[in-house]
Image: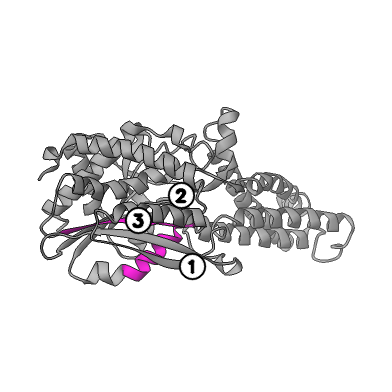
Amino acid sequence: MKFSEFPKAVIKENVDYTVKEITNVIKRYGPRESGNANCYATQKHIKKEMDTFCDETGFESYKMAPKAFLHFTKTVSISIILAVITCLLLVYLNVFSNIGPSDFFLAHCIVGGFVLCGLLITMFEFLFYKQFCDVFYKKIEGHNFYAKRSPKGEVKRRIIISGHCDSAYEWRHNYYGKKVHIKSLTGILMGLTIGSAVISLIVAVLAIIANFADMGGFGSFMANYSYYFHCFTALVMVTLFFFVDFKTISPGANDNLTGTYAAVCAIRMLDMAGVEFENTEVIAMITDGEEAGLRGCKQWAKDHKDEYTNSGVETAILCVDTLTDIDYFNVYNRDMTGTVKHDAKFSQLVIDAAKDAGYDKLKLANLFFGSSDAAAFTQGGITATCLAGMDPTPADYYHNRRDNYDRLVPEAIKEGFEIVLSTIFRFDEKGLN
């Protein structure tokens, strides 16, 4: 069967099913913090359904620290604020007098050190998604769920449709941005935070140099007055401290129960239409821990790398993340703030599959802020790419309490499902090589 022959009634039924199921999951299990009981209960709920039409289902557990990824926003901000205030106080109490060529010399050294450490932690955690701070946090057990649909013959190809079922801690900038009619408040404040920190570091370095080198009037200013820029940085750090609300968790209807049910319904639709591939295995994978820094898929990639790269079975993973904003459907071939490049052939295959399904506006795009599960697989040496439909500015529901079932867009879910189905058919027919 080709995608053009696939019964449209099956797709429509699954879109309706998805809207009902997402509503049911949120009402029944509530918000799903990475690694908590609600997340696991959601996966078990999905497993019970998929046991009826899959050849194999199961769980793989791992350890993670859910708050380690974003808690740096608290520790970095408060440490810089305290360093700036404490050093300023010590200068005016003459504690730093006669320590270095100027009263502010040691203060610049201390604040510059704290800012440098803060920037490094932010870079490792938020830019490169390294498990840099995990060692300082309590670990809990997370789970990845999988469901397989086997082919009639020998497995020669394997396509995995992946979505994460955990939901995010609320980003206050996103929630209150709409209330004050500033759509890009997150970008403005985060840019201001990082920018002021970088400038503070430069100011500290120049001030230290000015204490030992003759830089004229500029050097005198840097040594004696430039410290007050750090006060501005400390003020900006207040916005970073309040950036994440760890007590409020998004319902996660769009991000990412739509992606979760894209994986579930990919196999469900094949079963309902009686489609059996000759040599292509189809897997639905529901990860946990994406909102905790891709922890779940990082572990899955580590555990299955040899199977997916050295078994002789051509394997590709399509991560689906948020099917909501029709005007922003893209295949993200660059990920993790543009630092990770996904497989070019597979990314193009998804673009071509979208055209087969009647969607010719999709393009290759760069995920310039944040990351998707696909980045963890690509970093692990596994062929992957990401399909998403979300306003990147960001959307008004992104990572806040507005991401509820009343914000679902069935037409966007339908488009996502058709692209996923078409991708499976094209991969079965042509593969990547």
Tell me the residue that label 1 is attached to: 63
Q: In this view, does 215 lie to the left or right of 353?
A: right
Q: Where is residue 9 in the image (x, y as percent from the top left)?
A: 20, 34
Q: Residue 47 carries which label?
A: 3
Between label 3 and label 1, give the one nearer the viewer.
3
Decide which of 414, 28 is in the foreground and name it.
Answer: 28
Question: Magenta span has 413?
Answer: no
Q: Earlier in the sequence, mark 1 or mark 2?
A: 1
Q: Is mark 3 on a helix, strand or loop?
A: helix
Between label 2 and label 3, give the one nearer the viewer.
3
The magenta stretch spans which residues?
Answer: 280-304
29 w.r.t. 285: above or below: above
Q: Which of marks 2 and 3 is nearer the N terminus?
A: 3
Q: In this view, does 420 lie to the left or right of 210?
A: left
Determine the CA span between mark 2 and mark 3: 29 Å
Which quadrant would the C terminus be assigned to in this image? bottom left
Q: Earlier in the sequence, mark 3 or mark 1?
A: 3
Between label 1 and label 2, give the one nearer the viewer.
1
Q: Where is residue 328 in the image (x, y as percent from the top left)?
A: 35, 35
Q: In this view, does 273 lie to the left or right of 236?
A: left
Which quadrant would the N terminus be assigned to in this image? top left
Q: Which mark is residue 370?
A: 2
Q: What residue type is labelled 2?
A: Gly
